[in-house]
Amino acid sequence: MNKKNELIYEGKAKKVFTHDDLDKVKIEFKDDATAFNALKKAKYEGKGKLNCLISAKIFRTLIEKNIPTHFIELENQNTMIAKKIKVIPLEIVLRNIAFGSLCKQTTIKPRTPLSKPLIDIYLKNDELNDPLITKDRIELMNILSSKDLDFIIDLTLKINLILKSFFKNIQLQLVDFKLEFGFDIKNNILLGDEISPDNCRLWDLNQKNDTIVSLDKDLFRNDLGGLIEAYSEINRRINEFLETN
Ligand code: TMP
């Protein structure tokens, strides 16, 4: 990173730096992996680069379909230039198939297809362990107006349709994913953060039997190994698809 660029914020998987243009930031993707609110930590050489490249290609696809995002361009393989946003402290999770915490917290069986997408919203607060939150509590805390929350939910449903078909084209099933949003200087709501195998569950559709083959961070969460190989495979499939379409 250029000396003039100051570190503004360091998260678990990314560092955010100032840009010479004050309306922009530089986001550097780290090789760190964390799970269970950072109780579990590891480093995977090359993960930052893969997530940055995968995210950039997905953001470009979303922008082509008129989804407002913070992404501007890649500066290098593990740094993207993005519009500066004030991040809304909510994690918007959309589920197409029941898995993960939904099955730990309810009686719904893992792998149950959901008849319509389920949106679960969590408060982004490490000290409180990102609790599941309600619409009324979001308004009570003055995090967002009801109108802005509805806008974000509607955008998330639209993003799901685009992502489901994007991943299906590369033989991956989009089980669930997490999004974050923010306000730009003009107060527009933009999709922020990243879209990568760190925050999506992606199952291989090239599987002949009934076993789940995850190509995402569940490999790390569940100590299954092969994380870099899986992320590289996703990046390879995306490149192959984009070159031929
Ligand atoms: P969950 O089943 O653990 O609630 O996760 C749902 C989805 O959200 C899954 O694709 C992983 C993603 N996720 C994050 O990106 N960050 C998080 O902190 C958590 C808990 C989940």
Image: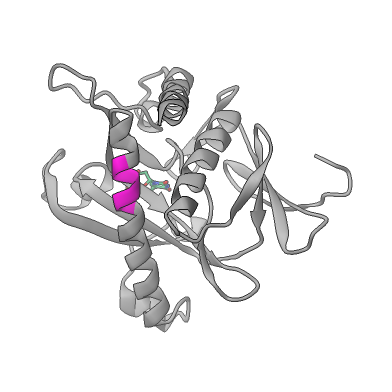
Please name the residue shown 36% across and 77% down the image: 137
For residue 128, which quarter of the picture? bottom left
Classify residue 145 as left or right of residue 86: left
What segment is highlighted magenta in the picture?
160-165
Give the dominant element type of the magenta stretch: helix, strand or loop.
helix
The percent position of residue 20, horizontal first and vertical second, equals 83, 55
Please name the residue shown 23% across and 26% down the image: 205
Which is nearer the eye, 139 or 240?
240
The percent position of residue 6, horizontal first and vertical second, equals 81, 51
Please name the residue shown 15% across and 16% down the image: 208
Please name the residue shown 15% across and 38% down the image: 111
Which is nearer the eye, 167 or 134?
167
Which is nearer the eye, 170 or 77?
170
Colour basis = one colour
Residue 149, magenta (yes or no): no
Classify residue 128 as left or right of residue 163: right
The percent position of residue 86, horizontal first and vertical second, equals 60, 67
Which is nearer the eye, 196 or 171?
171
Position above or below: 8 against 175 = below
* Number of marks: 0
The percent position of residue 7, horizontal first and vertical second, equals 76, 50
Quadrant of the rendering where the N terminus is positioned: top right
* Residue lying furthest right: 3
Position above or below: 161 against 99 = below
Residue 163, magenta (yes or no): yes
